[in-house]
Image (cartoon, rainbow, N blue to C red):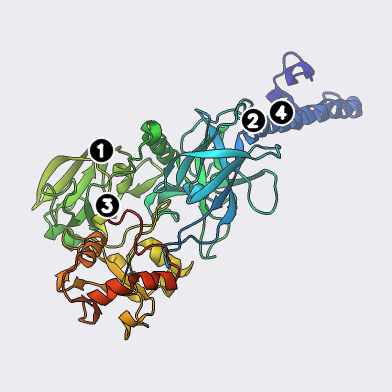
């Protein structure tokens, strides 16, 4: 096909030719008909060439990308936290991914979470190839998988990781949503960039929002601008309050995870071990010694054994993280168009690096370096949702005891925030301490003679065992197993008690396990040998 410059006169650029078509006038009245015919004869082919070239360029771009977008099939068998010795019925699901450097496929963590079998399928290839999970960051909802079949990646081009698009820039979303087997491409606009709660693991990280439709199966698919990955689709808007809103993991989070994966060991995103509240009240700012030109957030909790212990204290005001000044609403400025929570400045550090913190104490400004360390599970009494792990449990006297975590709470279904027991939900708002790191729940009673009188007790938080405060589940299980008193007295914070005779509990244990077809009285690894 001739180029556009070969079609028009040698002294006319394509832009000049288009302008001529729209603004040229005949020089002589008697030649008007001839001139119009001549103009049309030149303009129509030019428009056709322009449209054809544009379409060909778009088609070439799509072809360059679509072969690198992979459909992922998984068989997932999740543990049942109501009966923690067994798995739920395995289910099949699918997601999307994109080929990146190193013969790796980038996808969502939730696509392969709790997966016992993973397969990958190339565009326009009916065969499914066995895949292997290389690295998972549940916190960032990202995973890397690979296919070891020789030649699988030979005809696939690795996509580069690009930069975060500007607000209102158009992006393309590639993936394999439900409703068909072929690759789907939708377009949308980047409408917002800010910290969001990631639905998969409940983490609070930077995310991009787009107005493209996101459906099941799209998860893990790339968000593309200029043939580069600028995001990984992770979730759609929940609750039906808005239409066509989707969220993606942005490049900064992707790059953090890729760097973290280099040694094969999950470091995760650091936590300095303090919690804050916004300080936008003028009276409160003055009370904590700030001038009217100073802004920051108020420290309300510093955790034991954290990087901040002994260096920060309650009522300090954090003014800046590194070079990012913190506004009184807790935001920092990433660019002229993007504001987000100051936590992002900490998130971008890797484990072992120093984070510079500028703060005010009693009106005096100070500066310290805190080491970036992994978040401690003990920061909250209710641990966040975990994946690819075996649930802990202990059966004593026919009573099933488990630690309280979000896996258990979410077992009440998609509407868990309203259907789970109130006492369990309220515990999510409590901080932990060295003396109280975890809560223990008497989840259900397996009816037997040893526990007569308690058959209808369930979802009951236990705070004391024989008068001793319970620190965590391991300590509780050890105290039960090593008990040398006649009775075990379990008590909650309101004084209600459950009393079980220790000799009867030991004598009836095997019979109860056989009656309810339970393989073991406790989870593997609960008592190290």
**Figure check: 121 above or below 383:** above
Q: Position of residue 521 (x, y in %)?
A: 35, 64
Between label 3 and label 1, give the one nearer the viewer: 3
Asked if disc 3 and disc 4 are in contact, CB closer than 8 Å, the reply is no
Q: Position of residue 203 (x, y in %)?
A: 37, 53
- Locate residue 449: give its quadrant: bottom left
Q: Position of residue 3 (x, y in %)?
A: 75, 19
Q: Which residue is mark 2?
A: 64
In primary-sequence order, the first of circles 4 and 1 is 4
Left or right of 67 in this view: 207: left
Distance of mark 4 from mark 2, alpha carbons? 33 Å
**Figure check: 221 above or below 461:** above
Residue 397 in sight in this render? no
In primary-sequence order, the first of circles 4 and 2 is 4
Q: Which residue is mark 1?
A: 323
Left or right of 320 in this view: 123: right
Secondary structure at badge 2 equals helix
Between label 1 and label 2, give the one nearer the viewer: 2
Q: Position of residue 488 (x, y in %)?
A: 21, 75
Q: Residue at x 85, y 30 (%)?
A: 40
Distance of mark 1 from mark 2, alpha carbons? 40 Å
Left or right of 484 in this view: 405: right
Asked if disc 3 and disc 2 are in contact, CB closer than 8 Å, the reply is no
In primary-sequence order, the first of circles 3 and 2 is 2
Q: Which residue is mark 3?
A: 528
Q: Which residue is mark 4?
A: 19
Q: Quadrant of the N terminus?
A: top right
In primary-sequence order, the first of circles 3 and 4 is 4
């Amino acid at each position: 096909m001739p180029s556009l410059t070969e079609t028009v006169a040698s002294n006319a650029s394509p832009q000049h030719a288009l302008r001529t078509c729209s603004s040229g006038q005949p020089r002589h009245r008697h030649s008007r008909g001839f001139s119009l015919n001549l103009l049309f004869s030149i303009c129509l082919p030019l428009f056709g060439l322009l449209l054809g070239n544009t379409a060909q360029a778009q088609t070439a771009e799509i072809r360059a990308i679509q072969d690198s977008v992979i459909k992922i099939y998984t068989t997932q068998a999740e543990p049942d936290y109501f009966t923690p010795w067994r798995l739920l019925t395995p289910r099949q699901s699918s997601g999307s991914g994109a080929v990146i450097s190193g013969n790796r496929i980038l996808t969502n963590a939730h696509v392969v979470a709790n997966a016992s079998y993973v397969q990958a399928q190339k565009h326009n290839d009916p065969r499914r190839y066995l895949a292997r999970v290389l690295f998972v960051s549940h916190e960032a909802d990202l995973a890397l998988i690979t296919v070891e079949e020789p030649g699988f990646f030979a005809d696939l081009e690795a996509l580069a990781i690009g930069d975060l698009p500007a607000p209102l820039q158009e992006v393309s979303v590639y993936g394999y949503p439900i409703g068909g087997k072929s690759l789907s491409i939708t377009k949308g606009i980047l409408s917002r960039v800010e910290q969001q709660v990631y639905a998969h693991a409940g983490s609070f990280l930077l995310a991009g929002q787009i107005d493209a439709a996101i459906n099941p199966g799209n998860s893990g698919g790339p968000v593309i601008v200029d043939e580069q990955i600028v995001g990984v689709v992770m979730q759609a808007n929940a609750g039906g309050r808005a239409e066509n809103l989707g969220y993606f993991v942005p490049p900064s989070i992707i790059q953090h995870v890729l760097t973290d994966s280099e040694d094969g060991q999950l470091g995760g995103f650091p936590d300095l071990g303090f919690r804050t509240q916004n300080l936008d009240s003028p009276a409160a700012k003055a009370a904590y010694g700030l001038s009217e030109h100073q802004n920051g957030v108020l420290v309300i909790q510093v955790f034991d054994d954290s990087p901040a212990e002994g260096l920060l204290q309650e009522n300090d005001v954090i003014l800046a993280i590194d070079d990012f000044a913190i506004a009184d609403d807790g935001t920092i400025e990433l660019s002229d168009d993007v504001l987000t929570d100051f936590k992002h400045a900490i998130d971008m550090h890797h484990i072992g690096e120093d984070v510079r913190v500028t703060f005010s104490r009693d009106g005096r400004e100070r500066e310290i370096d805190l080491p970036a360390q992994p978040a401690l599970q003990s920061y909250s009494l209710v641990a966040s949702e975990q994946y690819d792990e075996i649930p802990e449990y202990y059966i004593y006297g026919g009573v099933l005891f488990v630690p309280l975590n979000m896996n258990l709470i979410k077992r009440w279904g998609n509407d868990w925030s309203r259907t789970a027991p109130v006492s369990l939900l309220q515990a999510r708002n409590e901080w932990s301490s060295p003396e109280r790191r975890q809560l223990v729940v008497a989840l259900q009673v397996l009816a037997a003679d040893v526990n007569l009188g308690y058959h209808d007790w369930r979802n009951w938080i236990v705070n004391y065992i024989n008068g001793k405060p319970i620190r965590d589940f391991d300590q509780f299980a050890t105290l039960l197993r090593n008990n040398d008193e006649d009775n075990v007295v379990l008590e909650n914070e309101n004084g209600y008690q459950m009393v079980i005779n220790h000799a009867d509990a030991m004598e009836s244990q095997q019979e109860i396990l056989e009656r309810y077809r339970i393989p073991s009285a406790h989870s593997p690894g609960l008592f190290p040998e």
